[in-house]
Amino acid sequence: MAVRGIRGATSVDTDTRAAILAATRELLQEIIRVNTLDCFEDIASIFFTTTPDLVATFPAEAARELGMNQVPLLCASEIAVNGRMPQCIRVLLHVNTERPQCEIVHVYLREAKKLRPDIHSAQ
């Protein structure tokens, strides 16, 4: 079985705990839905990043709220690149799967759709 990476990103309008958790839950639920991840056991780990202007909470809390209590989670801050999208939450799931890379669906929501206009799910 291979380990595949699933990428995604979303954005928030305000740096509040509620906004960060709601956006992260929405993103994770959509990644799970479109990639048919029926079992959290298949998720090897999840790496979250936020832009430096988001400090109200850890996005990983949203994964715990969804029941990912055994999945290793890690949060970090993105590097502060001038002119880049503010208030952005990014995620990289490492998933054990038999599916080939070409069948993995990456998900970009809200303003983060602008990050990857080349990816169909970002449309």
Image (cartoon, rainbow, N blue to C red):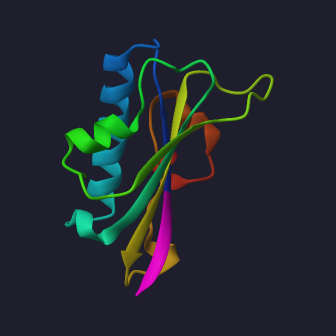
Q: Residue at 21% across / 39% down in the picture?
A: 65
What's the magenta region?
1-6
Question: 19 above or below 80?
Answer: above
Q: Residue at 60% across / 18% down in the picture?
A: 53
- Residue sitting farthest toward the right: 82
Residue 5 colored magenta?
yes
The x, y position of residue 74, in whole percent, is 47, 47
In-front residue for pair 24/58: 58
Q: Residue at 37% across / 84% down in the picture?
A: 98
Res 82 visible: yes
The x, y position of residue 52, in whole percent, is 63, 23
In-front residue for pair 82/56: 56
Quadrant of the image occupied by residue 51: top right
For residue 8, side relative to residue 95 (left or right) = right
For residue 69, side relative to residue 57 (left or right) = left
For residue 119, side relative to residue 95 (left or right) = right
Quadrant of the image occupied by residue 109: top left
Q: Residue at 37% across / 78% down in the picture?
A: 97
Main secondary structure along the magenta-highlighted residues: strand
Number of numbered discs overlaid on the protein picture = 0
The x, y position of residue 38, in whole percent, is 20, 66
Residue 89 colored magenta?
no
Question: 55 above or below 3?
Answer: above
Quadrant of the image occupied by residue 103: bottom left
- Residue sitting farthest toward the bottom: 1
The x, y position of residue 79, in whole percent, is 72, 34
Which quadrant holds the N terminus? bottom left
Res 123 visible: no
